[in-house]
Image (cartoon, coloured by chain):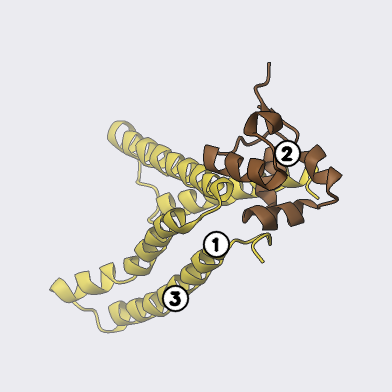
Amino acid sequence: MFCKERTPAFKRYQRRVQWAMGAYLVVILGAVRIVKHDAPVGWHLYFWSVLPALPVLAVIVTMGRYLTEEKDEYQRLRMMQAILVGTAALLSTVIVNDFVQTFAHAVAFPPFTGFIVFAAAMAIVQGVQRLRDRSSGDE
Amino acid sequence: MNNRLRVLRAERGWSQADLAEKLEVSRQSVNAIETGKYDPSLPLAFRIAKLFGNRIEEIFEESV
């Protein structure tokens, strides 16, 4: 039934994200093992460095696909709001990082900080959206 | 924008889930429209009007 909490497009989105995260787990474990034990150099090293990023990029593509496939305009708007806030948080982190590095010669934020901030901001927005639904006479 | 969606729905004894199913949207969408948090697009407003057998302006009105 369409009226359930999750729309068909959202179920597809969740399934794709789960596949991508599963692939990420396999790839990251493989990449860590190979880089640590085999110590590849040159383009081999670049290959194993880039490989774990591909499932994460697949998640970003999945977000785009969800926005094009979602027929429920309100759900689409909610996802767009979450992505927008996530992107704002990500860009803010990058900007602050760049300025403190440039002017204060500070150490750069740890790797992956940007994506973690992006995902956390999205999760917070989605949590707030759910709370707002509950507090507005949701039947 | 104000609307009479909750009243019209109650008159027919439908739950938000019932209306959501008829409109092929999520229950949250119906709730957001009823509470004025979200103004539907013109195509969705037409679908709502057609479902209740009213004109759009009989369901939705500009808030003053």
Residue at the image position 37 percent from the left and 77 percent from the top: A27
Towards the viewer: A4 or A1:
A1
Towards the viewer: B45 or A2:
B45
Q: Nearer the viewer, mark 2 or mark 3?
A: 2
Residue A116 at x, y percent in the picture: 47, 54
Residue A105 at x, y percent in the picture: 30, 37
Towards the viewer: B15 or A99:
B15
Badge number at residue A70: none
Compared to residue A19, the image places residue B51 above or below, namely above
Three-letter code for the amino acid on which mark 2 is drawn? Glu
Residue at the image position 36 percent from the left and 36 percent from the top: A95
Task: Indicate the secondary structure of the residue bearing disc 2.
Answer: helix
Three-letter code for the amino acid on which mark 3 is drawn? Leu
Towards the viewer: B13 or A93:
B13
Q: Nearer the viewer, mark 1 or mark 3?
A: 1
Please tell me in which quadrant of the rendered image residue A103 appears: top left
Gap in angstroms between the C-alphas marked 2 and 3: 43 Å
Residue B24 at x, y percent in the picture: 62, 56
Q: Colour of chain A?
A: yellow
Q: Which residue is mark 2?
A: B34
Compared to residue A97, the image places residue B28 above or below, namely below
For this orientation, the residue located farthest to the bottom is A38
Subunit under mark 1: A
Badge number at residue A10: 1
Instruction: Give the brown chain's letter.
Output: B
Q: Do discs 1 and 3 share a chain?
A: yes
Three-letter code for the amino acid on which mark 1 is drawn? Phe
Gap in angstroms between the C-alphas marked 1 and 3: 22 Å
**Label 1: how many Cα within 10 Å (few below 14, some 14–19, many 20+):** some
Please tell me in which quadrant of the rendered image residue B53 appears: top right
Residue A40 at x, y percent in the picture: 20, 78
Lateral position of residue A13 relative to residue A109, left or right: right
